[in-house]
Every structure is written in structure tokens, then in C-alpha cells.
Image: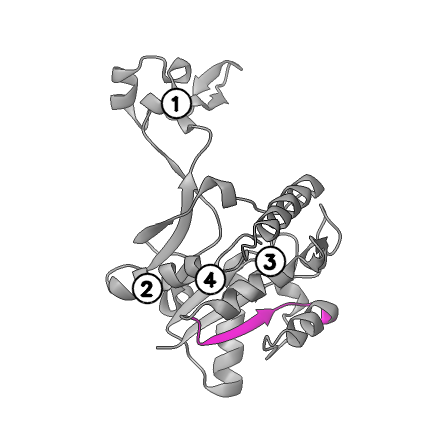
């Protein structure tokens, strides 16, 4: 079975200039996802999709394939992931007649990803032929039952009141209830997203049937700001002091 790991790393970034190679604990940010991917037993081929020559060269120096450069039209601020993945599939099929079965989305902005996360995701999808994809999630620190929207009169209305009337029967004001009493909800963590290639070819990033890979909140860091980068750096440096490899 061909399992293609795709590191997505466009050159542009508004929050942190050239974020994917910004320094973090002594290494470019991309270093950590590359190490996790290289240590994952399930990935049979590892490539990078980037529009940036410097990022491509850095990835290449660590043994990552650069079979193509991503066209600028698929590397805009608002470019959806599906365009990047569909382009990768087309380019590899046209150039090499290469068609993988699974795709692993590898984000440099998730430097606390472990090889075991990736392998767990691939194994889970392989074991469930009826499932389209798996996504890594961790327990949401903020319950959506404590989130509001504004109605037409500018008043606060519970976001999920109409969608979950049974919760509001049990807790008339769930936004005032203890979080531990409310239904558990999950947020995506971006460390182990695996999808069947046929789903992407059909125009979807995840499909209809998605299974979870549960990860710990302590590793739920998605680098978007300098504060996120500093937080990741502190965690990585602590792990190294404890002689633990981030990407195992």
C-alpha cells in the first residue's frame, strides 16, 4: 500500500514572515514535522508541496522529495487545502504514473506531531474500509455550549440551542453549567490527518465518514502567532531537557 506524506509549506505568511522555516528551539519549524514523518513506519513516500525555493531546498537537504513546485495559484492566502492536494495527485500521476492509496497531511505548523500519531492514523484508516479519513482531535478546552451568537436585535443567543434541545432541557442555561457536566466536544489538532486519495480526487478533503485519532491537549499547538511559536519552543526545549524526542 502506497501512503504518501505531503508536507504543505507555502512561502507566504502574514502572521509570521516565512513561518514554515522560522526558527524554533534551534531549528527551522519545518524540521520537526519532517523528523516525525521520517520516523513514521507507515509512510512509504515523503514529499513537500511548496512554492518557495528556499523551503524546497531545506526539505531536500533533510531527505524529502521535491518532485514539483506548487504553482502560485495554489499558494495564496485563501487557497484551500483541497487545491494543493489535488494538484499533487495530478502532478505525480502525469509525471510518474504514481497513484497512492492514502494521503497524510503533514503541517510544519504542528511541530509536536509524533511519528506514532501518524502511524496510528494510517493504521486506523487501513482497518476501516468503510471510512473516508481520520482526523486527530483533542478535547475542546472551551465548550461550544458556552458560545453565543448575536441575533437580529443584537442580543446574545446560545449558539447551539436549536441544534441540541435535549441539552437545554437538562441544563436550561448550559453556559452557566460546569464544563465537566456538559457533553464532551472535540477540536481538530492537525497532527494525524489521513485521507483516501480517491476522496481528494472526488473534491473533498475528508469525505463523509471520519474517525478520530485522540491526542493530548498538551500537544495541541498550531503555530499562527509569535506567541504560539514561543510556546512550542518552550515545550520542545523541555522535552529535550527530559531527553525525550519530540517526533517519536
Find out whether the residues at labels 4 and 1 contact each other: C-beta distance under 8 Å.
Answer: no
Name the residue nearer the viewer: 187 or 169: 187
Of pointers 4 and 2, the one earlier in the residue sequence: 4
Describe residue 136's horizontal placement relative to residue 10 as left or right.
left
Give the vertical position of 73 relative to 216 (above or below).
below
Q: Residue under circle 1? A: 179
Which comes sooner in the sequence, label 4 or label 3? 3
* Number of the label disc, if any, that sits on residue 123: 2
C-alpha separation, residue under disc 4 versus residue under disc 1: 32 Å
Where residue 235 sits in the image (x, y, percent)? 60, 45
- The part of the chain drawn in magenta is 43-53
Residue assigned mark 4: 115
Mark closest to the chain's N terminus, 2 or 3: 3
Q: Position of residue 185 (x, y in %)?
A: 37, 35
* Residue at (54, 78) in percent of width and height: 91
Residue in the picture at 48% in, 54% down: 191
Quarter holding residue 196:
bottom left
Q: Earlier in the sequence, mark 2 or mark 1?
A: 2
Which type of secondary structure does the marked residue at label 3 adopt?
loop
Q: Does residue 66 show up magenta in the picture? A: no
- Residue 86 visible within the image: no
Callout 1 environment at 10 Å: few (<14), some (14 to 19), or many (20+)?
some
Query: What crowding class fits label 4: few (fewer than 14 Cα within 10 Å), some (14-19), or many (20 or more)?
Result: many
Distance between the alpha carbons at the discs numbered 1 and 3: 32 Å
Which of disc 3 and disc 1 is earlier in sequence?
A: 3
Measure the alpha-carbon separation of dots 2 and 1: 33 Å
Where is residue 113 shown, x and y percent of the image? 51, 55
SS for callout 2: helix
Mark 4 → mark 2, Cα distance in angstroms: 12 Å
Tag 3 residue: 108
Amino acid at each position: 500500500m502506497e501512503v504518501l506524506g505531503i508536507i504543505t509549506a507555502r512561502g507566504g505568511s502574514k502572521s509570521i514572515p516565512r513561518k514554515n522555516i522560522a526558527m524554533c528551539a534551534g531549528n527551522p519549524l519545518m524540521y520537526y514535522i519532517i523528523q516525525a514523518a521520517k520516523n513514521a513506519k507507515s509512510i512509504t513516500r515523503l514529499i513537500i508541496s511548496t512554492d518557495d525555493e528556499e523551503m524546497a531546498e531545506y526539505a531536500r537537504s533533510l531527505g524529502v522529495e521535491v518532485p514539483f513546485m506548487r504553482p502560485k495559484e495554489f499558494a495564496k492566502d485563501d487557497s484551500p487545502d483541497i487545491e494543493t492536494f489535488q494538484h499533487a495527485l495530478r502532478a505525480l500521476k502525469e509525471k510518474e504514473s504514481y497513484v497512492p492509496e492514502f494521503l497524510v497531511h503533514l503541517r510544519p505548523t504542528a511541530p509536536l506531531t509524533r511519528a506514532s500519531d501518524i502511524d496510528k492514523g494510517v493504521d486506523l484508516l487501513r482497518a476501516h474500509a468503510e471510512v473516508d479519513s481520520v482526523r486527530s482531535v483533542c478535547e475542546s478546552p472551551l465548550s461550544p455550549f458556552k458560545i453565543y451568537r448575536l441575533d437580529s436585535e443584537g442580543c446574545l443567543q446560545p449558539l447551539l440551542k436549536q441544534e441540541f434541545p435535549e441539552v437545554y432541557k437538562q441544563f436550561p442555561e448550559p453556559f452557566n453549567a460546569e464544563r465537566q457536566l456538559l457533553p464532551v466536544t472535540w477540536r481538530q489538532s492537525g497532527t494525524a490527518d489521513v485521507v483516501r486519495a480517491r476522496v481528494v480526487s472526488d473534491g473533498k478533503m475528508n469525505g463523509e465518514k471520519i474517525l478520530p485519532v485522540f491526542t493530548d491537549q498538551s500537544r495541541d499547538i498550531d503555530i499562527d502567532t509569535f506567541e504560539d511559536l514561543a510556546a512550542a519552543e518552550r515545550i520542545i526545549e523541555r522535552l529535550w531537557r527530559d531527553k525525550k524526542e519530540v517526533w517519536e
